[in-house]
């Protein structure tokens, strides 16, 4: 499970993200329908700026082993950011 901890002046909360949700997210992100719509949305956004930008297709076979390997490193802190206003964001495996 991945934990996202957010702490500000007014409140703090922890968002646990189970690996099952990450597997579902990988399935959605690697789908052809999502890839087509993502490129369509970026084309519409950058059309006014005359920039041609397309996202590469993410393959499920590439992303699944990365997630599987992350499970072997429980307890490692991936992100630790502290802003000047006291806001903190931490992401821990």
Image: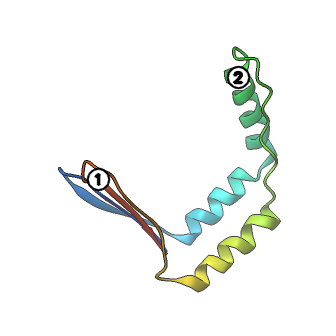
Q: Residue at x 59, y 80 (%)?
A: 71
Q: Horizontal placement of 25 versus 58: left or right?
A: left
Q: Residue at x 64, y 60 (%)?
A: 24
For mark 1, what is the residue?
87
Q: Position of residue 93 (x, y in %)?
A: 49, 75
Q: Which mark is residue 45?
A: none
* In the foreground, 24 or 76: 76
* In the foreground, 77 or 4: 77
The crowding category of the residue bearing disc 2, from other C-alpha atoms within 10 Å (few below 14, some 14 to 19, many at least 20), is: few
For mark 2, what is the residue?
46
Q: Position of residue 65 (x, y in %)?
A: 74, 74
Q: Residue at x 76, y 23 (%)?
A: 51
Q: Are marks 2 and 1 in contact (CB under 8 Å)?
A: no
Q: Position of residue 79 (x, y in %)?
A: 47, 65
Q: Residue at x 81, y 46 (%)?
A: 56
Q: Position of residue 31 (x, y in %)?
A: 77, 50
* In the foreground, 50 or 57: 50
Label located before the other in sequence (2 or 1): 2
């Amino acid at each position: 499970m991945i934990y996202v901890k957010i702490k500000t002046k007014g409140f703090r909360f922890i968002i646990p993200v189970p690996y099952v949700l990450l597997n579902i997210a990988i399935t959605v992100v690697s789908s052809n329908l999502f890839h087509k719509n993502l490129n369509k949305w970026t084309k519409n956004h950058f059309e006014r700026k005359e920039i041609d930008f397309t996202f590469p297709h993410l393959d499920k076979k590439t992303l699944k082993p990365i997630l599987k390997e992350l499970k072997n490193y429980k307890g490692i802190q991936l992100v630790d950011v502290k802003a000047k206003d006291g806001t903190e964001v931490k992401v821990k495996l």
